[in-house]
Image (cartoon, rainbow, N blue to C red):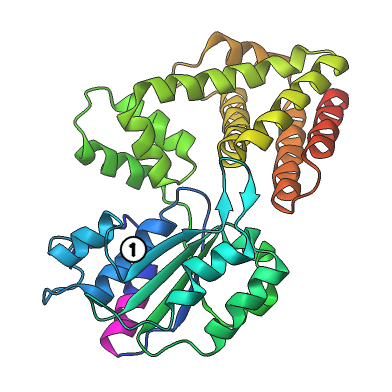
Amino acid sequence: MNWTTFGHKKAIQGVYKAYLSDRLSHAYLIIGMQNVGKTTFALDIAKLLNCVSENKPCSECQSCKRIESNNHTDVSVIDIFSDQNSSVSGIDELRDSFISKTNRKPFEGTSRVFILKSIDHMRVEQANILLKTLEEPPEDTKIILLAKNIDTVLETIRSRCQVIYLDPIKESEIVEYLSTFRSIADEQILQNIAKLSQGRIGWAIKMLNDPEEMNYVNQIMLDFLQIFKFSLIEKFDFAQEISIKLQKNRTETINEINLWLACLRDLLLLKSGYENYNFHEDYIRVSNELSFNQILQTGNVISETLENLNLNINPRLCLDMLMLKVHYFN
């Protein structure tokens, strides 16, 4: 076996055991944060079903390679949510890319696999199209649904799938993996990436391969620290900027807001006397200005804001309320 998925051993073992006993579910719902490895895991399941080697999945045969490069005729990856314009795929698009193909027999493999991403953005009318296939799928077809939060997935869909949770990966495991993925002399860089990744292996690999992106991430966190000295009007202006960014690229902006939590974690470490990392002077300044309670309260309202954004509550209202609370906390 050669699973591309890193970590998530329990999930891998569960699926592989079901495969060996011919008890794979016809539909899986994989839940996990952005970049934690949901798509990679789903593609590994597709490889497992279509691999031509004895030790499945091998990730080396022609079938596995074609699945990996999204060129396998029997494996389709469909994103319900388009991040370019923050829009949800229409009913006709879903019908053309998914429903119309489910009754076709496998062409070059043994199973047809449909991977539907961002299922938590699916509307009721789209779900109704999906439900019949989930209830009565063709024998040689597997459906794998991906979502960040199970609470935002319609109950009618949840009840028809076997749910698999992919938890955040431990920092120590990410550091160990990154050190083998690419040789870097400065281990502190690896530790910083792992810390900021919040358990998202895909995000960590992206940062490792793009130093400029890492610099951009650090700048986002430094920019966030400035809000503590902003006036209320300046905070509202900042909220408007983030709201506009959400409309242009929701996923990227949500990731930025998650980085604010990582920033607050560093402030708490500083307050606790942590000295094993060279913090920027702005971190030291803000940690001296804020109390433990103020930092914790700020973290709580940011987490609350992220939950509300995932529930599609008006972004500008969410962010204005966040800035209002932060202002009066501090």
- Asked where in the image residue 272 lies, by quadrant, the reply is top right
Residue drawn at x 23%, y 74% as measured from the top left: 50
- The reply to whether residue 130 is visible in this rendering is yes
Give 283 or 241, whichever is nearer the viewer: 241
Question: As displayed, is residue 93 above or below residue 294?
Answer: below
Give 26 or 255, whichever is nearer the viewer: 26
Residue drawn at x 77%, y 25% as measured from the top left: 240
Q: Position of residue 278 (x, y in %)?
A: 44, 16
Q: Position of 196 compared to 313: left or right?
A: left
Q: Position of residue 93 (x, y in %)?
A: 55, 62
Q: Is residue 19 located in the magenta-colored stretch of the structure?
A: yes
Q: Give the position of the N terminus as an image quadrant.
A: bottom left
Residue drawn at x 51%, y 75% as measured from the top left: 99
Amino acid type, mark 1: Leu
Residue, disc 1: 43
Q: Position of residue 24 (x, y in %)?
A: 37, 84
Task: Count every numbered label the image shows and give the total.
Answer: 1
Q: Main secondary structure of the magenta part?
A: helix
Mark 1 crowd level (few <14, some 14–19, many ≥20, 10 Å Cα): many
Give 329 or 142, whichever is nearer the viewer: 142
Q: Is residue 238 located in the magenta-colored stretch of the structure?
A: no
Give 100 or 80, whichever is nearer the viewer: 100
At mark 1, the secondary structure is helix
Range of the magenta residues? 14-21
Q: Position of residue 232 (x, y in %)?
A: 87, 18
Question: As displayed, is residue 262 above or below residue 166?
Answer: above
Residue drawn at x 79%, y 19% as measured from the top left: 237
